[in-house]
Image (spheres, coloured by chain):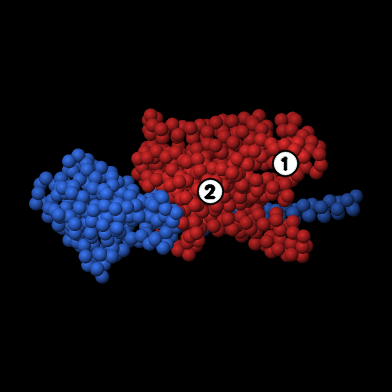
Amino acid sequence: MAQEKAMLIDIKRCIGCMSCETACKQLHGFGTDPEPTLSDTAFTVVESRGDKFVRKVCMHCEDPACASACPVGALDKLALGPVVYNADKCIGCRYCMLACPYQVPRYQWTKLAPFVKKCDMCVDRVKAGKPTACAEACPVQATVFGNRSELINEAWNRIRGDSSYVPHIYGVDELGGGCVLFVSDVPFEKLGFKPAPSGNQPMPTLTQSALGDSPKVVIMGGTILSALYWVTQRRREVALAEAEEKAVINKIRGERS
Amino acid sequence: MLARIKSEITLWRVIVGIIFVTGIYATYIRFFEGFRASTNLSDQMPWGLWVGLGTLCGVGLSAAGFGISAAVYLLGMERYRPILRSAILISFLGYLTVCVGYLYEIGLPWRFWHPIVMWNHRSVLFDVCICIMTYTTVLTFEFAPAVIEKLPWKRLRETVLHYHHKILIGVVLAGVLLSSMHQSYLGGLYLIARGKVHPLWYSQYMHAMFYLSAIPAGLALTVMAIYLCMRSLNVRIDPSILSDCGRMVQMLLIVYAFFKALDLVANQAFGYAFQRTTEAGYFWLEVLLFLAIPITLLSFESVRNNLERLYWSCAIVVAGFMVNRLNVSINALQTAMGTHYVPKWSEFASTILVIAAAVMAFRYAVIYLDILPKAPAKPTYRWMSNGGLPAQA
């Protein structure tokens, strides 16, 4: 089986030229005007934070919240790395948008048959053995594409070789990790990276306890309710029998007197 | 002729007319011009009024059906049998509005059947979909005798009702379990939105909170509906049943308040209630309407035993419940999502249209079917004196 692919984004190296954004738009046939935030025609954007530039893009989580949330399983994590969207299954409930901790999925609000739109890590190119369009377009190797395990080693090499880097790779452990990794020379929280809502636990674990309880609740609840029903029925029968008995006794007493 | 037409035009008929015209226009915009034209939804607020009011409130306020059918069929509380059918009808119609609302909500309504064949066990929403579909079927089954007994063919009627009765208990049991599951899963939907839902509402037991709050709200709505039927449709119900329901609503609200407070303390979220934020304001509005005022009011015997006062207390419960669900689904998300969402008029109009249709269906069902016991002849209001106690006839 092919190794899991990933992208490493180096915030120290990024010069904010937006070549990645343009390449992405060209590949998907969108207009090339830059957009301020992710949209249904911008799967990645370069946001400036102070004098730094931070790419916003789908993190391609190892255990994605969107894929666990989708009621029809239209979102899927491939062993190859990308989290992909199957438009043929989607019903347009938009629960993935609510679930995604990075607020990545976008919706075609203006269309009559709207679909969810997000980065698919150029899955067709990746399957063909090519790098993603954004990584290929980057002139300074601020975004590089490769095997995830090798990229993690590469990131640690960069951090070890240059003390200005923050000694942390964002995206390896956060929310169970993902296939988009960031290294930076500025602390991540200063760049708008929010603290991970469930630490290093994948988001789907948040719902697993509630969902996992349901068989127990059904079995216990069913047993208790059936038992209660049996008790009420039995009491009714007993009450009826007692009433009958009483009636018979009264009748006999009446006859004697 | 003109005078006759004029006499037919009453205030409520005009209101219903306006609701239907605007609602149908809003529906047209939704299905023929799309979300951008008909809603203020955005990438930052993907779920809005349709989910908050239509689905969360619709399902929650329909909770009385399973509650009262469990009480009567399973626990043998025969006392509540007179209001059983009305509670089931309210639930049935409530779930129908949710099913119709579902077609508005999803972007590709012609694919409404996808969850039936495309399963994702890990999705709370999938479980909600399946539970609601199944439970709507159960409710259809539970309500069916009211229609079947009106059929003119005696043999068919009796055969169907005979077999219906044989499997009824099993179906009721399944219905109670299904309800318990999806009432709580509606809260479970928001479990995965940790970091987005404001801490005053987010907790790992959100699903339990939804379950505990739905039952008193559904019961309160049933009391309201029965009171209105008694006032305008010649329905006669022993008022002490309703005041007992009022007492039950109060007790259930106290249970919910206890667990909600416990939950806030356990999550160390109580502090947020005293910050100067909009969320804190909405939180206190919810506490006031859903808990503080009704629990106080319903503790007075003079309120419980007076049908009109009981009605208004239940109305406050229902209003407070709606504030709670809208808080969770909209207000609790706005800060984290960095947006401010105010529903468009068409979102209101389409939701109200569906609700109005359900209310009308309820009215005609009460008139033409045997949903609630009706007064035999001219209505007398003897029992209304003496504080609403039944006449000692």
Q: Circle 2 is placed at which residue position? A: B27
Quadrant location of the N terminus of chain B? top right
Taking the image as shown, residue B341 lies to the left or right of residue B298, namely left
Tell me what residue is drawn at x 52 percent, y 56 percent: B131
Depth order, front residue of B266/A254: B266
Q: Residue B21 has which mark?
A: none
Chain B's colour? red
Q: How many marks?
A: 2
Dividing the picture into quarters, in which one does residue B311 lie? top right
Sequence-wise, which precedes: disc 2 or disc 1?
2
Residue A72, image x and y in percent? 43, 60
Q: Residue B233 has which mark?
A: 1
Residue A27, image x and y in percent? 26, 59
Tell me what residue is drawn at x 40 percent, y 56 percent: A115
Tell me what residue is drawn at x 46 percent, y 50 percent: B34
Chain ID, blue in image: A
